[in-house]
Image (tube, grey):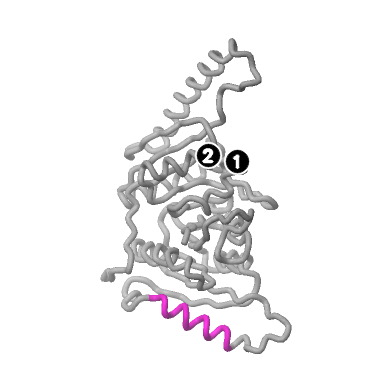
Amino acid sequence: MPAVATKTRIQLKNILFATDFSWAANAAVPYVKEIAQHFGSRIVAVHIRPPVVNPMTYPTSWPVFIEAAESENKRHRMELLAQFPGETTEVIIEEGNPLTQIPAVLEKKHVDLMVMGTHGRTGVPRLVLGSVAEEMFRKVECPVLTVGPNSLMSNGMAGEFREILFATDFNAGSLSAFDYALSLAQEFQAQLTLLHVIPEAKSGELVSDAELEEAAKNRLRKLIPEGANDWCKANIIVERGEAGEKILDIAKRRNADLIVLGVSEEKGIPGACTHLPIAIAHTVVAHAICPVLTVRG
């Protein structure tokens, strides 16, 4: 198919892989490999561990802890390099708080995409790196690809996105996310589904379902640039219901390889992580059958 230029053709020169060496973190490794190979990216593998020295212990015992930590760091460094054979990989192992250390590395290394795994825990969502990491994808400026425990259900090869689902409520913040969805659809000649979920009807609502649905479909169609059908098939879906549940349902029905969401910057309210209703991004990330790309608007 002839390629038609998108508004923004993404470049992924540097990918950061955040890990704590858990099974959930390791599930993201194949995606890091495939994406790095496809885009010719440099990998920055990062592990942030708790401080070695505990002020509550006797100083005479500190050398023992430091020596053990250095030995473990060496082992972890070799493990990370072995996970990405043949790839240009820089390993960074530091002690401290992931919520402050990782954003600093992202800026210093000019990272274009962060990749991390998730255990998919519900209730208070927690990602691989601990309680602070559940906030990572709404605090960092670069896009974040989270790989959940159900991602293995996807039929596509890790990092080869053939069916992309983009969900939006038409908030201005989602436009940046759509640029990524559209560019990736072009990059992989993928099918692209644009989804808008209309909230459940409220008492006294005057506009009919049919009118709301048609208006939403028109807005979604206007997002698709002229000529896009030359290189991908764009599908328009508008349904009424709870946004998180609908996004997950449509992803299963479409057998999606990737879900793309726009998220808003953290404003200090836990769970206020997306331009969609509160905690929807966390819900989708925890339960999706495929990785979720969140792009901060």
Which residue position is annotated with label 1?
130
- Image label count: 2
Q: 229 or 108, which lies in front? A: 108
Q: CA distance from mark 1 to mark 2?
A: 9 Å
Which residue position is annotated with label 2?
98
Kindly report the secondary structure that dominates the magenta region of the rendered protein. helix
Q: Residue 22 in the image: x percent, y percent?
A: 56, 37
Q: Is residue 121 magenta?
A: no
- Which residue is at 42% across, 40% downward? 105
Q: Name the quarter where the N terminus is drawn.
A: bottom left
User: Compared to 69, does 274 lie above or below?
Assistant: below
User: Compared to 84, does 138 lie above or below?
Assistant: below
Mark 1 residue element: loop
Query: Which stretch appears magenta?
Result: 211-224
- Which residue is at 48% across, 38% downward? 101
Q: Is residue 218 magenta?
A: yes
Residues at marks 1 and 2 touching, judged by CB atoms closer than 8 Å: yes
Q: Amino acid at mark 1?
A: Gly
Q: 186 or 98, which lies in front? A: 98
Residue 285 is drawn in which quadrant? Answer: bottom right
Report crowding for label 1: few under 14, some 14 to 19, many 20 or more residues within 10 A (C-alpha). some
Q: Residue 67 in the image: x percent, y percent?
A: 51, 16
